[in-house]
Image (tube, rainbow, N blue to C red):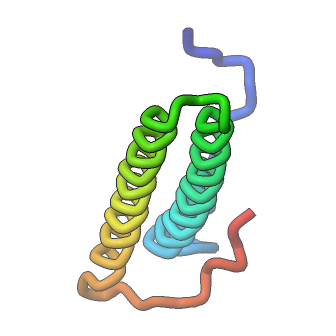
């Protein structure tokens, strides 16, 4: 349901910040957030797999769990590489300069 009583998010006016700069900085922040989430997920998946692969698990199950972990880690690396590739390709377009916008994330 759409709420109309709450505050409305606004973007900075074009006079104070160019739209391209605003979107670029927001994109960089999102990139950082995604990379942080993927790193956190990798750590949790690894810990979970190791927990489920304790000495009490049969040897064959432990081996299968480790193969599964490698598959999941590869998938997370693929996601990270794809997100970075999207970011790099959008920065290399005409008229897009790269500046140090990472410090404005938060």
Which is more toward the observer, 104 or 45? 45
Please report the residue visible at 65 percent of the width from the left and 45 percent of the height from the top.
44
Vertical placement of residue 80 versus 50, above or below: below
When the figure is inspected, residue 3 is found, relative to residue 30, above or below; the finding is: above
Task: Single out the residue that lies furthest toward the top.
Answer: 1
Q: Residue at x 59, y 29 (%)?
A: 57
- In this orientation, does residue 14 appear? no
Viewer-side residue, 104 vs 21: 104
Q: Nearer the viewer, residue 50 or 11?
A: 50
Dividing the image into 4 quarters, which one contains the C terminus? bottom right
Residue, x 44% and y 43% (percent of image)?
Answer: 63
- Percent position of residue 74, x then y: 37, 58
In the rendered image, is residue 65 in sight?
A: yes
Q: Is residue 69 above or below residue 25?
A: above
Q: Position of residue 46 (x, y in %)?
A: 60, 49
What is the x, y in percent for residue 9?
65, 42
On the rendered structure, is 69 left or right of 104?
A: left
> In which quadrant of the rendered view does residue 70 lie?
bottom left
Give the left or right position of residue 82, taking residue 101 as reference: left
Image quadrant where residue 35 sits: bottom right
- State the image coordinates of residue 5 (x, y, percent, origin top left): 73, 18
From the viewer's perspective, tell me whether residue 46 is left or right of residue 86: right
């Amino acid at each position: 349901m759409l709420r109309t009583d709450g505050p409305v998010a606004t973007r900075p006016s074009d006079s104070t910040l160019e739209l391209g700069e605003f979107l670029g900085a927001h994109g960089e922040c999102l990139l950082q957030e995604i990379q942080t989430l993927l790193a956190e997920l990798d750590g949790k998946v690894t810990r979970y797999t190791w927990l489920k692969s304790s000495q009490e698990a049969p040897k064959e199950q432990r081996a299968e769990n480790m193969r599964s972990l490698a598959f999941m880690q590869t998938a997370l690396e693929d996601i990270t590489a794809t997100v970075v590739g999207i970011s790099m390709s959008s920065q290399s377009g005409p008229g897009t300069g790269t500046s140090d916008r990472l410090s404005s994330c938060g």
